[in-house]
């Protein structure tokens, strides 16, 4: 029996191989590998997809957050509010900007920031709020926008897992002051390596990030400020342009697969992903919750079905952040989620037969227990 992977990039590549090989031949014949025509075109196309005037390609999603924070003036001694239940890149960007992360626990149903707990964490040192649209689910943005207006604190959206997700018809990334995306290979829109993007309606932010990503230079050897080597390369941009044309269709297929899971698991003692009113969840991951998570994961793996855990250790308990003296129990919803979440395979190319095997495996596990 074949193994069902958590993500099947080979199946996707088979559909795109001819277009990708052609694009690469053109790049290798010209050998313009950085900040060329593919990067420029992809920036325009992705900006249009998100409904904003500016998009700046960078080397990774972490760099997108880092550069966006610096463009907002975040620096030494500042505070940035975010969640402890996300990938560490969110916090790495805060630290790289010289600021301190201030955590707010998650809502147990959406796994995104609990907006009711944000205001109590805002001080004069708070310079940004980073809500994370986790697993493809948009955060509750309206309360955060009200706080942003009340306190003058900008919202920087971490949309690394939410390409094409929407709240009230607005694409995530376009709602706050700026939005940051990752094109890590396993994302809904993934490169064949690393890549990232910042989108914004603010021309000043866009201009600042263009400098930061390219050693602070507007033109070659004319360095306006100390910058970084954080450019999106032509190869990744070419691949992403090809994939972007299919992203809406792929997201629709993910939602279709999610609907089948929901129907199949409705009577089981597990928590299914929440999808709030007026939200368009793009299911980067289909994450269930059960206290029998580890046993279920082993049961499925023994039957050649891969799963994932996103994320097993919340950030406030990571050794890398020990200097901030967080403790177990500080953010109980994040800790509970970390012990219960399990990601099932969900990707556009998932076949009906393979999804049927996954469903039968989950159902048989709970019948046994």
Image: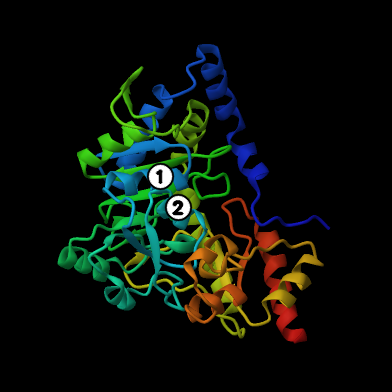
- Would residue 267 be visible to someone looking at this image? yes
Q: In this view, does 236 lie to the left or right of 176?
A: right
Q: Quadrant of the C terminus?
A: bottom right
| Residue located farthest toward the top when viewing the structure as drawn | 29
Residue at x 53% of width, y 24% of height:
23
CB-based contact (under 8 Å), mark 1 and mark 2: yes
Q: Is residue 264 left or right of residue 253?
A: right
Provide residue 143's location: percent of width, then percent of height: 25, 71
- Would residue 44 be visible to someone looking at this image? no
Pair 1/2: label in front: 1
Give 4 or 142, whichever is nearer the viewer.
Answer: 142
> Which circle's residue, 1 or 2, is located before the other in the chain?
1
Q: In this view, does 211 lie to the left or right of 264?
A: left
Residue at x 37% of width, y 28% of height:
41
Between the residue at mark 1 and the residue at mark 2, the CA separation in whole angstroms equals 9 Å
Provide residue 42's location: percent of width, then percent of height: 39, 33
- The numbered disc on residue 234 is none
- The numbered disc on residue 160 is 2
Secondary structure under badge 1? Answer: helix
Q: Residues within 10 Å of mark 2 (few under 14, many from 20)?
A: many
* Quadrant position of residue 281: bottom left
Provide residue 291's location: percent of width, then percent of height: 64, 82
Secondary structure under badge 2? Answer: loop
User: Mark 1 = which residue?
Assistant: 64
């Amino acid at each position: 029996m074949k193994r069902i992977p958590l993500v099947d990039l080979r199946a996707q590549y088979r559909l795109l191989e001819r277009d990708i090989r052609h694009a690469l031949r053109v790049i290798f014949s010209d050998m313009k590998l950085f900040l060329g025509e593919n990067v420029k075109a992809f920036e325009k196309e992705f900006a249009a997809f998100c409904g904003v005037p500016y998009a700046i390609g960078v080397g990774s999603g972490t760099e997108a957050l880092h550069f966006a924070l610096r463009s907002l003036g975040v620096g030494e001694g500042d505070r940035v509010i975010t969640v402890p239940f996300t990938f560490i890149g969110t916090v790495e960007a805060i630290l790289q900007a010289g600021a301190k992360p201030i955590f707010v626990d998650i809502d147990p149903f959406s796994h995104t920031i609990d907006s009711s707990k944000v205001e109590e964490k805002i001080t004069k040192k708070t310079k940004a709020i980073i809500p994370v649209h986790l697993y493809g689910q948009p955060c509750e943005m309206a309360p955060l926008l009200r706080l942003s207006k009340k306190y003058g604190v900008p919202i920087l959206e971490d949309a690394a897992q939410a390409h094409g997700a929407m709240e009230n018809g607005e694409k995530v990334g376009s709602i706050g002051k700026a939005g940051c995306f990752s094109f890590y290979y396993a994302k809904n829109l993934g490169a064949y390596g690393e890549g990232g993007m910042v989108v914004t309606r603010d021309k000043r932010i866009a201009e600042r990030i263009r400098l930061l990503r390219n050693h602070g230079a507007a033109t070659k050897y004319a360095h306006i400020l100390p910058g970084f080597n954080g450019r999106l390369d032509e190869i990744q941009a070419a691949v992403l342009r090809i994939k972007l044309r299919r992203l809406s269709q792929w997201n629709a297929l993910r939602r279709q697969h999610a609907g089948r899971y929901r129907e199949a698991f409705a009577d089981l003692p597990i928590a299914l992903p929440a999808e709030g009113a007026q939200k368009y969840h793009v299911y980067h991951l289909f994450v269930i919750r059960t206290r029998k998570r580890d046993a279920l994961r082993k049961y499925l793996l023994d039957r050649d079905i891969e799963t994932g855990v996103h994320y097993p250790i919340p950030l406030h308990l990571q050794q890398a952040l020990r200097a901030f003296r967080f403790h177990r129990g500080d953010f109980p919803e994040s800790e509970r989620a970390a012990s219960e979440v399990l990601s099932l395979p969900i990707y556009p190319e998932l076949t009906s037969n393979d999804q049927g095997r996954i469903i039968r495996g989950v159902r048989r596990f709970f019948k046994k227990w």
